Image: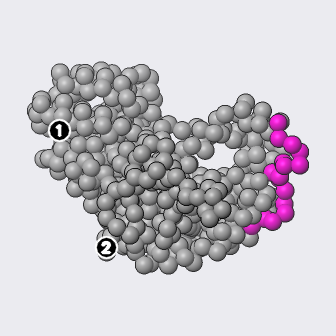
Amino acid sequence: MKTSDEPSIAVTGLAAMGSALARNIASTGRPVVVHNRTTERARELVDRYGSENLVMVEELDELVQRLEPPRAVICMVKSGRPVDDVIDSLLDLLEPGDLIVDGGNSDFRDTERRAARVHDRGIGYLGMGVSGGEEGALHGPSLMPGGHRWAFDLLEPALVAIAARADGEPCCAYLGEGGAGHYVKMVHNGIEYADMAAIAECVELLRRRCDTLDEVAEIVDSWADGELDSFLLEITARILRVPDDLADDGVPLLERVSDRAEQKGTGRLTAQEALELGEPATTIAEASMHRTLSSLTDRRSAARAATPASLTRAGSSTGVADPDAVASALLGTRLVALAQGFDLLDAARHEHGWQLDLGDIARVWRAGCIIRSALLVDVAAAISGGSPHLLEDHRIAERLAAADTGWRETLCAAIGTGVPVPVTSAALAWLDAFRSERLPMALIQAQRDLFGAHTYERTDRDGTFHSSWTPRPNRSGSQTES
């Protein structure tokens, strides 16, 4: 129920997420004014759910007139120019003390620019990540708000009321100034990319072992009953069991879904940001890259046609991986994806001057969001208890060590049968690199020094050095490598 000092709320942009979020807010007893660029969608929503405290308006000026100050307008439109268009319209209508909330997947840099712009008008701005899909938005999403602190404080009761809850705690926390909230959502989506790809790779390996997708679903169900429990694994088991109703021939629908994966760009943005900050988020980057590769259907077909039949191993059932080994590979990959995500968040808080609380972020992700999983309980405990780098936590290190043998067995089986597992293999390579005493980068430094005089550092003395890299003659007078 709205209290007297809370802002009155409107939602503009009534696609699936916006409509669900408006209904969620209305279900808490708070009246919600709803608006959409095409009026018909707003009318359909109110006609169907109007008794849920929803009031439709056709124009933004009417929306503002319907709200008592202070006003909070939650914008759920497509990221990019549409958000700026809404802000342009609202700035001439709102008053100092009112709020604008961008609940889409905006680039955090755009959010920082917009927050600075509206601040000059005395208007509060929040860039808020909303995760959970349509169902989560309706029944309890994970909320990641950032921006003006006073704006969050004003809207906090309403946000806490609609957020998912884990162990009685709302999955909503103020994450910092400027674009902090949208940055955290971007990293969440990058982890999501990796998680989805790892599950897809592991399911593909199980398909080489099982006769039917129902058998694969049974294995996935067993995983979801243990430490691998997650929303994405639960919906995977569900997907595997759905028949194709259009054909009505008993063939699973998944068999007829194109393998050309789409992406809206947040995974790619995460990978780009990792490169900018010098964080090796290789698993997240590979998940985005493999989606890109999947879209190159003509080139894939041409490459397959040019491959000698003797090398076409896809579909082979020899050397199939044991389900327990595949589970270990999935566990390890998911932990690595989380580790890379939190490493990036730690780098970002230093780079951008945000007061990101990584423990709060892990707790906000425990329920409501797409990457919610049992693992996040342990991750939250690890981060809250010490280093932000998960590899340095003994509990996480022990779990990764326990997964090691099965993980390697899984990759060997995949390579032997020609099943591409780029994300699962990238995760293990990243882990091996961090745990190695010496990496093969010494040769790269020597190469750079030889052809470009870029210098190198030594292990036995301080400073930087440059060498001619001229081989010395041996005793017979011939040249030998030094």
**Residue 462 placement, left or right of 233:** left
Tell me: residue 242, above or below residue 427.
above
**Residue 441 placement, left or right of 34:** right
Q: Nearer the viewer, residue 253 or 384?
A: 384
Q: Which contiguous range is marked in magenta?
A: 306-321
Q: Residue at x 73, y 58 (%)?
A: 415
Q: Residue at x 72, y 32 (%)?
A: 299
Which residue is disc 1 drawn over? 124
| Quadrant of the rendering where the C terminus is positioned | bottom right
Does residue 308 show up magenta in the picture? Answer: yes
Tell me: residue 90, above or below residue 396.
above
Amino acid type at mark 1? Gly
Q: Is residue 140 visible?
A: no
Tell me: residue 36, above or below residue 286.
above
Which residue is disc 2 drawn over? 386
Tell me: residue 29, above or below residue 379.
above
Q: Nearer the viewer, residue 144 or 282?
A: 282
**Residue 27 placement, left or right of 222:** left
Q: Secondary structure at mark 1?
A: strand
Q: Where is residue 272 drawn, in percent x and y?
A: 43, 42
Q: Nearer the viewer, residue 71 or 56?
A: 71
Q: Secondary structure at mark 2?
A: loop
Q: Where is residue 233 drawn, in percent x and y?
A: 59, 60
Q: Where is residue 222 drawn, in percent x and y?
A: 65, 70
Q: Residue at x 50, y 53 (%)?
A: 469
